Amino acid sequence: MATRRFVAPLRAQLAADCFDHPVFFAYARQADWLHGEAWPGIDAMNWALHADPLNADLAFVEQSQALLDGLHYEQRIRHGGRIATRSRNWHDLFNALAWIRHPALKRVLNRRQVEEIDRMGLKVRSRSQSALTHFDEGGAVIVVRDPDLLPLWDAHDWHGLFWRERSAWGDGRIEVAAVFGHALLEHALHPGQLLVAKCIAVATTADGHHAIARVGAAIAAGTLLQDPQELRPLPLSGIRGWHPECEDAGFYRRAACFRPLREGRTYPQPHVC
């Protein structure tokens, strides 16, 4: 059966409370880009990007035929600092927000992608490229401070992780440090969507900002994201307040996102920092 292609809603079709979802909280600084009736222009995106002087070598540029110079999208960023961006497009708007919010992380993913393109060519994708893309599109960084929660995640004991231990998601024992993937943000435009992130787990007592920085350093060093199997699926909709049905214990047994562990599937230990 063919996979149904995701289609983002038109801006005028969005539910009034769409952006009240926790997945968008980290992007509140540009809330007017989301809530407003008008789409932000390239100049507004670049103003926000260049608020950090370290991003002076980067710029969002309108995607057009003139821009298409034979280079891969990632090569154009790496060698010319030009981030091709389609106008009035949710996917590219969320990509822009990720660049503005997490430029260091986006840079290391871009550098690694270009290194793989240089090694593999344009027609063949490596396992590393797939891992980098999966994280870029659907990734999240999860901080785990209580090691007793890991066996629940490892076993896909979603009822245990999200219902019996639901307080852990509010008391600091485990938290979402960053919802990074721009395709994941796009999927959240549909109310009630079952959101599943492809995660890097970090075992630390430090705050989320430190964890994100250490993840970026590990990706840059090539010790993370060499293979898609390193990424842990996590149904974000199981977190209290992230889905309308998460106050019902039965939700964690019937919803399609809470899949059992596939036979033989194991996960790497969390990144420690």
Image: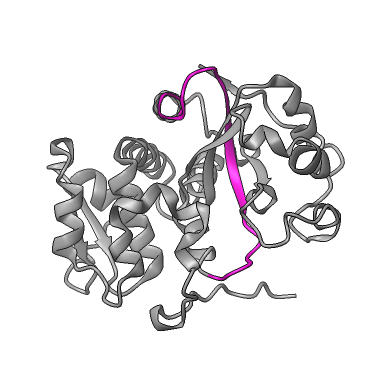
Residue 103 location (% of width, % of height): 30, 40
Residue 38 in sight in this render: yes
Residue 108 location (% of width, % of height): 35, 35
Quarter residue 109 falls in = top left
23 vs 198, left or right, is: left
* Residue at the spot 43% in from the left edge and 30% down from the top edge: 212
* Residue at the spot 46% in from the left edge and 29% down from the top edge: 208
Residue 73 in sight in this render: no
97 up-or-down from 70: above or below? above
| Residue closest to the eye, 58 or 258 | 258
| Residue closest to the eye, 225 or 160 | 160
* Residue at the spot 76% in from the left edge and 38% down from the top edge: 161
167 vs 170, left or right, is: right
Residue 100 location (% of width, % of height): 28, 47
| Residue closest to the eye, 239 or 268 | 239
181 vs 92, left or right, is: right
Quarter residue 54 falls in = top left
State how many labels appear.
0
Quarter residue 147 falls in = top right
Residue 198 part of the magenta segment: yes
* Residue at the spot 73% in from the left edge and 61% down from the top edge: 245
Residue 116 location (% of width, % of height): 42, 40
* Colour mapping: one colour
129 up-or-down from 208: above or below? below
Quadrant in the picture for the N terminus: bottom right
Q: Which residues are magenta?
A: 190-211
